[in-house]
Image: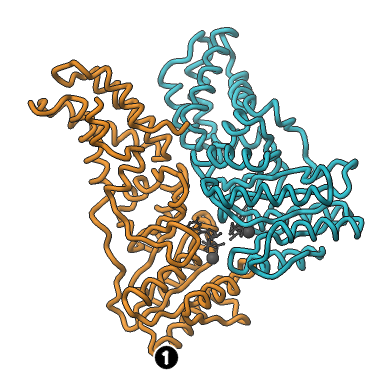
Amino acid sequence: EKSKTSFFGKLSKAVAGKSKVDDEVLDNLEEVLVSSDVGVHTTLKVIERIEERVSRDKYLGTDELNRILREEIAGLLSETNSGEATEFSVPEDKKPYIIMVVGVNGVGKTTTIGKLAYQFKKQGKKVVLGAADTFRAAAIDQLQIWADRVDVPIVKQSMGSDPASVAFDTLKSAVTQDADVVIIDTAGRLHNKVNLMNELSKVKRVMQKVVEDAPHDVLLVLDGSTGQNAFEQARQFTKATEVTSLAVTKLDGTAKGGVVIGISDQFRIPVKYIGVGEGIEDLQVFNKYEFVDSFFK
Amino acid sequence: MFDNLSEKLDKALHVLKGHGQITEINVAETLKEVRRALLDADVNFKIAKDFTNNVKEKALGQNVLTTLQPGQLMVKLVKDELTELMGGDAEGVNLSGNPSVILMSGLQGSGKTTFSGKLANFLKNKKTKKPLLVACDVYRPAAVDQLHVVGEQIGVEVFSDRGNTNPVAIAQAGIAHAKANGHHVVIVDTAGRLAVDEEMMNEISEIHKAIKPEETLFVVDAMTGQDAVNTAKAFNDRLDFDGVVLTKLDGDTRGGAAISIKSVVNKPIKFIGTGEKMDAIDVFHPSRMADRILGMGDVVSLVERA
Ligand SMILES: Nc1nc2c(ncn2[C@@H]2O[C@H](COP(=O)(O)OP(=O)(O)OP(=O)(O)O)[C@@H](O)[C@H]2O)c(=O)[nH]1
Ligand SMILES: Nc1nc2c(ncn2[C@@H]2O[C@H](COP(=O)(O)OP(=O)(O)OP(=O)(O)O)[C@@H](O)[C@H]2O)c(=O)[nH]1
Ligand SMILES: [Mg+2]
Ligand SMILES: [Mg+2]
């Protein structure tokens, strides 16, 4: 909080009443943004926006500055993020609503699924989990433990079986049980491994044999401490599976996750959730203003 | 986004080409590109700044060698400086104990459990040791199962105590078991933890104090961004670790975190992880890593083109 005031304080002093932002302030802003993993490209974009704004709206008061800075940064997210949502929700017209969770190794996919299942279950929805990570050591056991914690059914096969077949079974079972939400876990994979990326496309295709427009949501999980490589992750997973939303995890640490701003801007994918811990309740609906504010803390 | 430095420097080198000497202006121009490339590679903001300032001093301090174009000199300066920053050639792990105890530490999901298996496999096959894996992650769902599966894959015994929620006690019991059963090396897998989690950081300090490992390794994901410095520093402050393991280098990340970590804690990077399988482990090579961060497959070819 202290450094936050001091940063905004500095900014205000340097900009208030002027029609041009001086270089020292812009350097400061650059440091804050780059250090939050926003990346050089997006940072320059933000700085341009601020400069434009200041030269257009001349003689800005101190109070307006906070707002403008937040607005301009959050603005990169605005077209795809309403920023108003506070509830976990799924569209009522898809039943079951099918979420496929993808991402590179160790980002928090399985944990996020456990937390999401908990949120939906709390709303009285009938949730089914599908254990389509049949590769990583004890991945199925891990999801099983989450299923038990939340008390929802899980569909699984043995380790090493075909993930597409698990996803198929899960959808079949969910339809039979008249479930509201299905969440499919997948094995972590690096986006530069062509075979593994093709496997994901296949999982998706096979699901469509049961529910024509499945999956309704392809949730790409990004680790909040990941740097610029997250861009390439978003690009390649989008290519393979048409990612429709993002979750950023591990924001309970000191990492800021700023790289998602550029990603959301460039790929037009909304950020839906943030992970803020390992506990069952540690998932929040994304709020872009709080997110941007965290850079200045 | 991932234009490599060669391309960028090529562009900047146009400024230099034809000039007989390195002037302040063309140095600044080139170094701006270098700095940006470093930031795109996730080198920490402050470290990238210091780095380019250092190179600038050196560049301005040097008279142009007659055999070299200024551009060549510049590329060489950058590359040498980076390699030097990254430290000497890889050092192995300390196996002088009886048994030698190796403690893993790091953030959640960085690859500790997988690397514990890889290291055990490496020591078993390459150094004909008899390792024991000890399961001290009492939090993550199925963490103990995961280590058992890994142990089975590589034919290495795993010590666990499922009823016990005290990792210090489990680690100590594991070492006692190793002594009684003639294991040369004990690899202690621990839970992932954030540097800001006071309770969990205390826990790993306690484990560290109790078992006095010959070797403490900090396992870090090569895709880590600007936060790498904070985390590495916090773990080092608590554990004074002996080396770093950089995982997931089979991806296409530049891995600039490697420089950041090296500069901030000055500990050697010992191993790299290059896949999910048990044999995907390699020793660290500073000069290869420098090339990777700069995106220069081949500095020579760049210089030839310039
Ligand atoms: N601090 C913190 N830890 C998290 C968060 N989300 C997940 N984790 C931890 O990160 C580690 C990896 O999480 P998983 O859910 O297994 O990740 P994954 O993407 O399923 O991993 P793979 O299946 O191996 O690719 C675990 O130790 C989790 O407890 C979070 O929001 N905050
Ligand atoms: N591609 C690739 N994946 C890796 C590498 N090392 C580990 N992984 C994967 O990364 C994920 C996390 O690895 P773990 O070994 O479970 O990580 P951890 O640090 O023990 O995680 P926690 O115990 O939850 O903190 C798994 O999916 C591993 O298979 C590597 O070098 N390359
Ligand atoms: Mg998983
Ligand atoms: Mg582990």
Chain A shade in the render: cyan
Dot 1 lies on which element?
loop
Q: Residue at x 31, y 69 (%)?
A: B93
Identify whether A88 is placed above or below B123.
above
Please report, as a chain letter, where disc 1 is located: B
Among the 4 quarters of the image, the one containing residue B144: bottom right
Residue B241 in the image: x percent, y percent?
A: 36, 63
Display coloring: by chain
Residue A113, horizontal then vertical, whole percent: 71, 55
The image quadrant of residue B183 is bottom left
Is B133 on the left or on the right of B75, as rendered?
A: right
A93 vs B30: above or below: below
Is residue B87 among what the camera can see?
A: yes
Residue B249 at x, y percent in the picture: 43, 52
The reply to whether residue B108 is visible in this rendering is no
Q: Which chain is orange?
A: B
The amino acid marked with disc number 1 is Asn
Q: Residue at x 63, y 37 (%)?
A: A291
